[in-house]
Each structure stands twice: as structure tokens, then as C-alpha cells.
Image (cartoon, grey):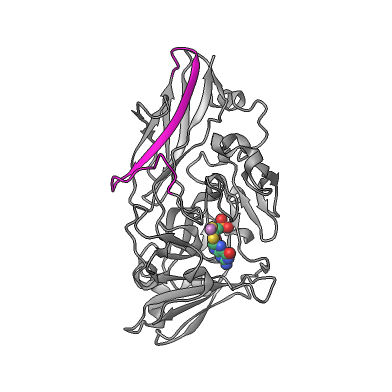
Amino acid sequence: MDRRKFLQAGAGGFALAGSGLLLPRALAAADLPSGAVSSGVLEALTGKQPLIKRSYRPPNFETPVEHLGSAITPNDRFFVRWHLSTIPEISAANWRLKVGGNSVERPFQLSFDQLRSDFEAVEITAVCQCSGNRRGLSDPHVPGVQWAYGAMGNARWRGARLKDVLARAGLKADALEVSYDGADSGALEKTPDFIKSLPMWKALDENTLIAYAMNGEPLPHWNGYPARIVVPGWTATYWLKQVVAINVEPRPEKNFWMSTAYRIPKGKFPITDRFLSQEGEANTPITEMVVNSLITNVKTSARLRTGQAHSIRGVAWDGGYGIRSVEVSLDGGNNWATAELEADLGRFSFRTWQYTHTPAKSGKLTIMARATNRQGSSQTRELIFNPAGYHNNVMERLEVDVL
Ligand SMILES: Nc1nc2c(c(=O)[nH]1)N[C@H]1C(S)=C(S)[C@@H](COP(=O)(O)O)O[C@H]1N2
Ligand SMILES: [Mo]
């Protein structure tokens, strides 16, 4: 069966990716509060293809799984996530980036043209994934945007190195964190402004960028035009959009988005990167992504034919160590076979993979995939529960029928 037929075969009675059929059985649609995973409808924001709407104000839209099968996610299908509802239209001509803070020698401002012409341009292919991707699958349920699988995308990001821009300002010896602010704001006075910070070592990493292009185009408005921070390997909470101010400070950034939100329990996840100036007794800021994979061309209840070869396809990614292997199981995880890894676009990118299989007899198959990174870290079988629903890399289980 070719790929198109394969997809069609799975499409019977199934309206939208991201709706109830992708849920594990324990989370039947009826059990979810309204607005949760099962109720996603497709809607197009200006300049975007239809995406699965999770909320309108602020705009939270995820990419349908079938559009995550290629290594690069097109700009007009790239997911959209904002915490605050007031998102200004910015013109590049009027935009200024203020670089300052108590730990720089010489504060200065940059125009859009200066950002592009004064610093070496670097291009990196990297996955931008929301910390809460797959939160809607958490059992027990946790509050927050009820994402299914599509709060992520992979793109070629072009920009100036953050470290080159900081070098122009001159760092003082006491520099501890680089904090940054976007142009968006809350509809209510009391909504805390979205400000994030990085430890110096990550801010000065040669892969951390102030990006002004995405897949060879200007950034879409919804993805941070005219410029955003790109932190390859780390979850997208640090990838600040519409960046307008960067401050280097000798003290930890204390606002709500650093000290309360985006924290994970200590010691539960296989994480290497630490953000020491923000660590607490029990929890710590989320940092790098955990290794994960997504099957992109098979849906639960798809029908396959005995004796016909079909390809199971997907993507795998991690926090930047690189994917070592992807394995596929057809019997619910008892036996595993090695999938073929396709083109390597760098250690921060989606790695596409495929596995060709010819069912020998009719019956049910439970298809699973598991990625392992070069650190030897792999996906979990059981959810590592945490109150914010972060870092869900539970192996998928897709039941299909062989006729
Ligand atoms: N200015 C600003 N930047 C932001 C956010 C935001 O609310 N405001 N959300 C962050 C979070 S949590 C995510 S998941 C990513 C989403 O990036 P995208 O909308 O380009 O997909 O943007 C990040 N950058
Ligand atoms: Mo996010």
C-alpha cells in the first residue's frame, strides 16, 4: 500500500488529527473537561493554514500530526503558543532591541538592519517544542492548555548569535543570567509580563540565537516577527518571541514565569542541563527536551492488508545529543526492530525515520516506536507524572487492523 492509500485507509470516520482517537483508552473523550484534547477544531489564523485550536485568546494552535511527518515544518503550519493576549503588530522599521542590564559595560540599542548586518549570520535547524506538548494526554488530568501531539515544529532558524550581541555590550564579571522580554502584554494589569532568563553558559552557547528568519523567510507574526530568541535543545518556553529587551543581571530573574511556572520536580527526569541559579529545594526550571518520537502516518484503527508492504514513518528528536536509534514494535512492545534513520540535519533537528513492514496474517497489531539518543536515554512506557504535564515522552501505542 502506498503512503497516500495508507493514510486514506486510516481516515475512515476520523475527522481531525488530535481528536479523541489519538487518546489512550484511559482518557476517553467524555472524561475530559471542555476545551481539552478531544474538542480540537481546525481554524486558520491570519497567514496560517488551519491548525487545531486550543484557545483563541491568547492564541494557542497546534499542528495536526500528519503535517509533522517531514523534517522541516512549513512556517504556515507551525504551531502557535502565547501566554498573553495583547500581541502587537510590529514593523521591522520601528522595532528596536535594547541590550543592557546591571552586568553590562555599555548598554546599546539595535535596529532590525543592524541586527542583520552587524553580526555574523548563523543558521541552525532546531526543534521548537512547548514544555507542555502532550499535556492533554496526562492521566490524571492536569490544568493548562490541553495539547495533544502538535505543540512542536522543526525549522531552519537564521540569526545572530546571542553571545556576539552580548559581546558588544561587554559583560561584567558578576553576570549571572540573561533575561529577556517580548513586546506582548497581558490584557489585565495583574497578568505578569512574560519574561524569561537563561544561565550565562547557555546564553553564551554558540547555538543560542536572536533569529530573524525561519526556513528562509521572515518569521511569521504569530511566531515572533521580527525577531525571537532560539535556544536549540531547550523547551520553547525560552524561545522568546518579539524580543525587545535583553538584560544581563547579577541576580536571578524572579518573575512568575521563572520562579513558579515551567518548573519540574528534581530528580525525576533524565536531564543533564542544570539551571543552578534558579534551582529550588524540590523543583527546578525545565531545561532541555527529553528524547521523543512521533509516528506521523498511522492512525489508530487504520486498516492494513496482509501481504502488502507498508511504511511506518515518523520523526524523533531530543535535547541536542542526537538520535542514536529508533525502534518499532508491532506487538505492543514485546519485540522491537530497528527503523531506518533518514537524513541527518544536525543534532537539534527532527530526524525522520521509516520502517517497512509486510503483515503476514490478519488480526490486530499494536504499533509502537521508541527513540534512543546518543546518551543512551530512551522514551518511557509509563507517564512520569508532574503537576504541569511537562516532558511527556511516553511511547505511543496505535492499534491497527490487518485484513
Ligand atoms: N513573547 C513571547 N514569547 C514566547 C511566549 C509568549 O507567551 N510570549 N511563549 C513561549 C512558549 S511557552 C512557547 S511554547 C513558544 C511557542 O513558539 P511558537 O508560537 O513560535 O510555536 O514561544 C515562547 N515564546
Ligand atoms: Mo510552551
Give how far across and how far down residue 172 sits, in percent.
35, 84
Image-based side of 154 in relation to 185, left or right: left
Give how far across and how far down residue 373 sits, in percent.
33, 45
Image-based side of 288 in relation to 236, left or right: left
Image-based side of 27 in relation to 204, left or right: right
Q: Residue at x 43, y 58 (%)?
A: 123
Give how far across and how far down residue 114 sits, in percent.
51, 74
Is residue 226 at all visible to an observer of this figure?
no
Is residue 287 at all visible to an observer of this figure?
yes
Image: magenta residue range: 358-384
Q: Quadrant of ligand 1?
A: bottom right
- Which of these two is toward me, 279 or 104? 279
Give how far across and how far down residue 60 sits, in percent.
63, 55
The question of residue 366 being in magenta is answered with yes
| Number of marks in the rendered image | 0
Up/down of 309 relative to 195, above or below: above
